[in-house]
Amino acid sequence: MASLFVAISPAQAHGYISSPASRQAMCAQGRVANCGDIIYEPQSVEAPKGSMQCNGGGTRFAVLNDNSRNWPTTSVGQNVTFSWVLTARHATSTWEYFVGGTRIAVFDDGGRQPAANVSHNVSLGGRTGRITVLARWNIADTINAFYACVDLQVGGGGGNPPPTTQPPAPACGTPWSASAVYTGGALVSHNGRRWQAQWWTQGETPGTTGEWGVWRDQGPCG
Amino acid sequence: MRRVLVLAAVLALAGCGAQPRAGGAPASEAPPPPPPSAAPATVDGARNPTDVMFLQMMLAHHEPAATLLELGRGKATRADVRGLAGELATAVAAETRTITGWLESWGEPLVSTAHADAHAAHGGLPALGDKEIAELGRTGGAEFDTAFLNLLIGHQHGAVELARMEATSGQNPQVKELAARTDEATRAQIQQLLRMVAG
């Protein structure tokens, strides 16, 4: 009955789009490597309102603007539900969605605090092929907004099929060694599959630690 | 009325604005922390206020997390989501026991008494409270799974922030080691959770 909801989120923590995965979510989930500091705080892409850049302008998190990164896309239909991870629920003026400089949707919260879970259904207006959607979460009582870019592969259908992504082709890495020390994130190959360590480990054989154990199966490799 | 907000202390230590952080070393270069189950039952006495606050805030972080994870373990549609919720619930319970033991051995309170108003003044409210969990409980199906994952991811980002605060400003080696493990393990969890929610 007692509530102990401590404000565990320091002030710079706010929010980003998790589904379909935004660029910062791609970095934070390890799908895109060498992203820099964004992996620690994908929720913090905060900058003054009005920018059309994926990082909101400025120098911080500039990797998000780098189209040469070949960002993975999520396959979608014409109607897409964008859902957000929020770590602080700031009073909100609007949520805006853009494609190529054109605003395709806006949701006006009128300065209210958003719900803990925010999602918006957006029509892509007949666009097809590879597109990048820029989302802006405009805070009501500061000069700032939060920015997120989402890369989509838009099919012709009208539905909203389960999003699927196209990961890069896997290659077998270093073979696992029983005597080596591995830390979280380390990738090895074992029995024709790739495995990623979730935390520090030594002497635990990939494939024997269970679905939620230290070694996570990353699929077959060649 | 045990509603306690300890953000003021965090703001004082971590700074209020959006500040660039030093990048962490790649995992391959970081000193290997022991596995999560290896936290020692006792802790050295030497400590500074950040060590105490970090432990208090981790306890406060784990309390709503335990409630959320229990709900997810029972109600998620997807088996992988239920499995992860169960695993994390076990880890949260174990770590709660360890941290409680450490604070008690120091004779420190389990709950910080820091000032309560700083948070509201800062424009945001914590994303995970009784009300939010109750609202989540009224959803179902795929909608529940997505909402559960997003709430949990947001909550876990808070643990990373706390751990990095302790890494920067803490003193006690065992508490700092706990923070290093928390940072690494929680970001691995977030990776997994983000992959789940992305489809």
Image (cartoon, coloured by chain):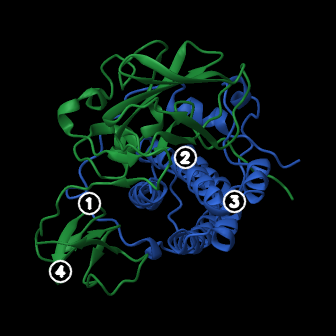
Q: Nearer the viewer, mark 2 or mark 4?
A: 4
- In terms of sequence position, does the residue under pointer 3 or pointer 2 come before the other? 3
Q: Chain of mark 2?
A: B
Q: Nearer the viewer, mark 2 or mark 1?
A: 2
Q: Tell me the residue that label 4 is attached to.
A: A190
Mark 2 crowdedness (10 Å alpha carbons): few <14, some 14-19, many ≥20? many
Mark 1 crowdedness (10 Å alpha carbons): few <14, some 14-19, many ≥20? few
Q: Chain of mark 1?
A: B
Q: Tell me the residue that label 3 is attached to.
A: B63
Label 3, label 2: how far apart the Cα atoms are? 13 Å
Q: Amino acid at mark 3?
A: Glu
Q: Tell me, by letter, which chain the rendering colours blue.
A: B
Q: Amino acid at mark 1?
A: Pro
Q: Is residue A66 above or below residue B147?
A: above
- In terms of sequence position, does the residue under pointer 2 or pointer 1 come before the other? 1
Q: Nearer the viewer, mark 3 or mark 1?
A: 3
Q: Chain of mark 4?
A: A
Do the residues indicated by labels 3 and 1 lie within the same chain of the protein? yes
The residue under the point 46% across, 32% down is: A124
Q: Colour of chain A?
A: green
The percent coordinates of residue B32 (x first, y second) are: 28, 65
Badge 2 vs badge 4, beta-carbon distance below 8 Å: no
**A56 displayed left or right of B81:** left
- In terms of sequence position, does the residue under pointer 3 or pointer 1 come before the other? 1
Image disc number at residue B158? 2
Label 2, label 4: how far apart the Cα atoms are? 35 Å
Badge 3 vs badge 1, beta-carbon distance below 8 Å: no
Decide if residue A148 is in sight here: yes
